[in-house]
Amino acid sequence: MIAMAQMSNIFRSLAARAAPLFVAVALAACASTSIDATQALNPDPPAKMFADGDSLMSRGKFEDAATKFEQLDREHPYSPEARRSIVMAAYAYYRGGKTPEAIASAERYVALHPGTKEAPLAHHIIASSYFDDIKGSNRDQTPTRKALDQLKILKTRYPDSEYAVNADNRIRLAEDNLAASEMEVGRYYLKRKNYVASINRFKTVVSDYQTTAHVEEALARLTECYMALGITKEAQNAAAVLGHNYPDSKWYKDSYALLQSGGLAPRDDGDSWLSKAWKSVPKIGLSSG
């Protein structure tokens, strides 16, 4: 009985000592909840949040800046700053090396606000993100194609924007990479005497990438493939296009010699797919023969 009484006294003593601690923890939790609720109900004004995000950007804290801009969009969705904050979040992610996030945010912007003042910047961010991911001509060209699509949007929809002015060189590089990729695959098939498959690749270069340095070889390879298949009319036409536009090319000399070995000569056929494709390019025509 004495032992039970002593234990009861000990428990009462511990409870008395612990009570203030429980009260303090409860009060702290209530205070924290109250602060969070206050912040949720009374966020900073949009102009201040935008300025804070811009400040974080200037200090190189790009991910924090993106988070701040996204917070602004959530908490003030109908403010003028909210629209700009979406594209600024994309830019912050891009500067921070978070390209998937940059693309997602920029694509969201152009979906919600096409044709607005910041739309060229959003397309530029998407294009730059994909362009930075371009690999060699022997790798997957999906980023190259997506970058090229966005660069062409800049040139066609926003020709007066600063981003469109700077897009030309990137377009040339992207097209050259795509043409080089088509040539690699075409040569692969050609070595294995799969002439139809190789022709399809070389046709793509001649039809879609006529301003690249690869078009001379593509025309010569078409001559070679058509000769191998006995389609001499197309072989003559390909050589005629090559000779008219690149008369001093070593590829033309090789194609001319190949035709001569078969008792043929370059000859333009205006009804050929190649003649029609080539004539669609401004300031480039074909000679008649």
Image (cartoon, helix red, strand yellow):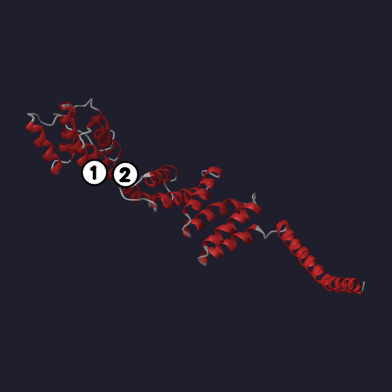
Across and down, in percent, residue 44 comes to 67, 60
Q: Residues within 10 Å of mark 2 (few under 14, many from 20)?
A: many
**Residue situated furthest right in the rendering:** 1
- In the image, is 10 to the left or to the right of 187? right
**Residue situated furthest front in the rendering:** 1
Vertical order, 119 against 232 (above or below): below
Residue 214 tag number: 1
Vertical order, 6 against 37 (above or below): below
Of residue 195 and residue 61, the one placed in the foreground of this image is 195
Q: Which residue is mark 2?
A: 178
Vertical order, 220 against 76 (above or below): above
Across and down, in percent, residue 181 comes to 29, 44
Give the mark nearer the N terminus: 1 vs 2: 2
Of residue 179 and residue 18, the one placed in the foreground of this image is 18
Give the structural element (helix, strand or loop) at label 2. Answer: helix
Quadrant showing the C terminus: top left
Q: CA distance from mark 1 to mark 2?
A: 10 Å
Q: Identify residue type, mark 2.
A: Leu
Residue occupying image coordinates x 22% and y 40%? 187
Across and down, in percent, residue 273 comes to 25, 28
